Image (cartoon, rainbow, N blue to C red):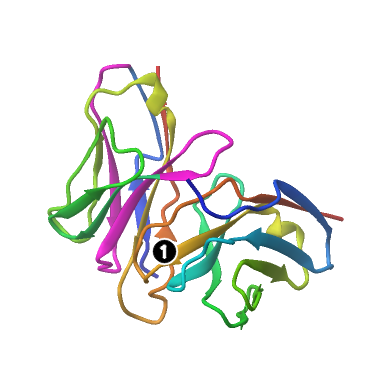
Amino acid sequence: DAKTTQPTSMDCAEGRAANLPCNHSTISGNEYVYWYRQIHSQGPQYIIHGLKNNETNEMASLIITEDRKSSTLILPHATLRDTAVYYCIERTGTASKLTFGTGTRLQVTL
Amino acid sequence: DAGITQSPRYKITETGRQVTLMCHQTWSHSYMFWYRQDLGHGLRLIYYSAAADITDKGEVPDGYVVSRSKTENFPLTLESATRSQTSVYFCASNGPSGRRYNEQFFGPGTRLTVL
């Protein structure tokens, strides 16, 4: 079973920041937090990952709490194309398998 | 750009028939994975492979067989299809090195219906 918990759904107005929370209270010291998203029925797409420091790339920012028990994915300026299911995943190593939960369905509206 | 492809994209078959889903990647990634996604649920791992001729079971392997004779191909076979195997199947790959080695790349999926 997935070890992360996420809200089932969230709404966000276009142009505003979307903040997606994730709880991973049992995360191990060598486990990274990964975020993927799945748009409609396409294959999942990698967004970002981190261990303990905050991370930013061209798609999003990842804020990890100091105790590493939770994190927040931030889409700074959400667009309609960001409507998707977002998965927060704990992962060890660089090539190990992913364990998906049910994710958060983000709906971006006009 | 190189990629990961799956075939067929859509398949309808009958209970008891053998079905093989194909997955091909052009990056020479060592790791390949098969997931299934049932309607309204997250993905579940069926089998994965760390290299050619090395495969291992995932969360839901029963009823499936895999092989990996070449690095670029990872076919998934349903030996005797059942209705419960109606699902969308995703293949994925990632490599142990390179700039984007942390990313697991997913194919477009195969939608399988077992009647």
Q: Is residue A89 magenta?
A: no
- The x, y position of residue B109, in whole percent, is 43, 45
Q: Quadrant of the N terminus of chain B?
A: bottom left
Residue B33 is one of the magenta-drawn residues: yes
A99 w.r.t. A92: above or below: above
Nearest the eye: A63 or B79: A63
Position of residue B51 in the picture relative to residue A55 (left or right)? left
- Per the image, label 1 sits on a secondary structure element best described as loop
Q: Residue at x 42, y 27 (%)?
A: B86
Query: Where are the magenta residues, as a range?
Result: B15-44
Assign the C terminus of chain B to one quadrant of the image: top left
User: Which residue bears the numbered disc 1?
Assistant: B104
Question: Which residue type does callout 1 highlight?
Answer: Gln
- Is A97 drawn above or below residue B90 in the view shown? below
Q: Which residue is found at the position 38% from the left and 28% from the top?
A: B85
Residue A60 relative to residue B84: left or right: right
Residue B25 percent across, percent down from the top left:
30, 60
Given residues A88 and A11, the one toward you in this image is A88
Residue at point 12%, 55% (across, down)? B53
Asked if residue B113 lies left or right of residue B77, the reply is right
Q: Chain of mark 1?
A: B
Image quadrant where residue A108 sits: bottom right
In the image, residue A36 sits, relative to residue B1, either above or below, namely above
Give whichever of B103, B9 is nearer the camera. Answer: B103
